Amino acid sequence: MTGPRPPLVLASASPRRLDLLARIGIAPDRVVPTDIDETPYGGELPRPHAARLALAKAEAAAAVEPEALVLAADTVVAVGRRILPKAETEEQARACLDLISGRRHRVMTGVVLALPDGRRLKRLVETAVTFQRLTGQQVADYLAIGEWRGKAGGYAIQGHAEAFVRFLSGSHSNVVGLPLFETAQLLRGIGWLRP
């Protein structure tokens, strides 16, 4: 990257993404939450869905902050071809937990870096997660905690749900909401972040 380093804008109000960035010494200059329709298209598969939403968030924030470097991400949880919702109700969270109980599911995060020159750098990271078989009491207790609200797949791996994970293959930070290795590689690749 030549010239002065542009400000970094995070296209998300997610406290989890801010915390993850802080772990690797990055503090965005500004946070610009975006309001995009996250409804999957009919027949849309999980990977393209995550990539599309991340790009849409990046484009929306870049339109507001054209001189900035915009970092956007979207995380999707899927069982097979089925995209699980970001649980907003206890019923949605219960349905998600019942579906992933004792099963392998995938967590995909699309990451987009929108540069002021119009380039869009993209990554898609996938992590496989297997939960133990959950008892009805475990599900009820977890729902009572409430940390599932607004979380893809109805759980927060950085919280109490981590105790349900039997197996994880891939990036743990990806499951939280932002794959740190790949994000740092994107920023290093353009010279914005130094090792």
Image (cartoon, rainbow, N blue to C red):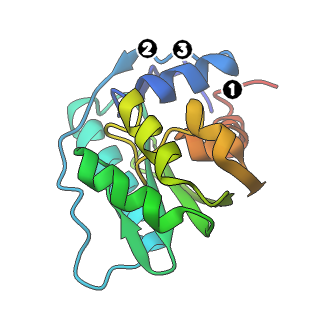
Q: Secondary structure under badge 2?
A: loop
| Residue 81 appearing in the image | yes
Q: Mark 3 and mark 1: span between their CA atoms?
A: 12 Å
| Residue 186 appearing in the image | no
**The quarter of the displayed image where residue 129 is located:** bottom right
Q: Residues within 10 Å of mark 2 (few under 14, many from 20)?
A: few
- Mark 3 residue type: Ala
- Mark 2 residue type: Asp
Q: Nearer the viewer, mark 3 or mark 1?
A: 3
Q: Position of residue 94 (x, y in %)?
A: 36, 54
Residue located at (35% from left, 45% from top): 58
Q: Nearer the viewer, residue 11 or 85?
A: 85
Residue located at (65% from left, 39% from top): 162
Q: Nearer the viewer, residue 15 or 148?
A: 148
- Mark 1 residue type: Leu
**Mark 3 or mark 1, which has the lower sequence index?**
3
Residue located at (39% from left, 49% from top): 118
Res 193 label: 1
- Residue placed furthest toward the front: 137
Asked if disc 3 and disc 1 are in contact, CB closer than 8 Å, the reply is: no
Q: Secondary structure under badge 1?
A: loop
Q: Position of residue 110 (x, y in %)?
A: 49, 55
Which residue position is annotated with label 3? 27
Res 29 label: 2
Classify 177 as above or below 49: above
Q: Mark 3 and mark 2: span between their CA atoms?
A: 6 Å
**Mark 2 or mark 1, which has the lower sequence index?**
2
Quarter of the figure with the N terminus: top right
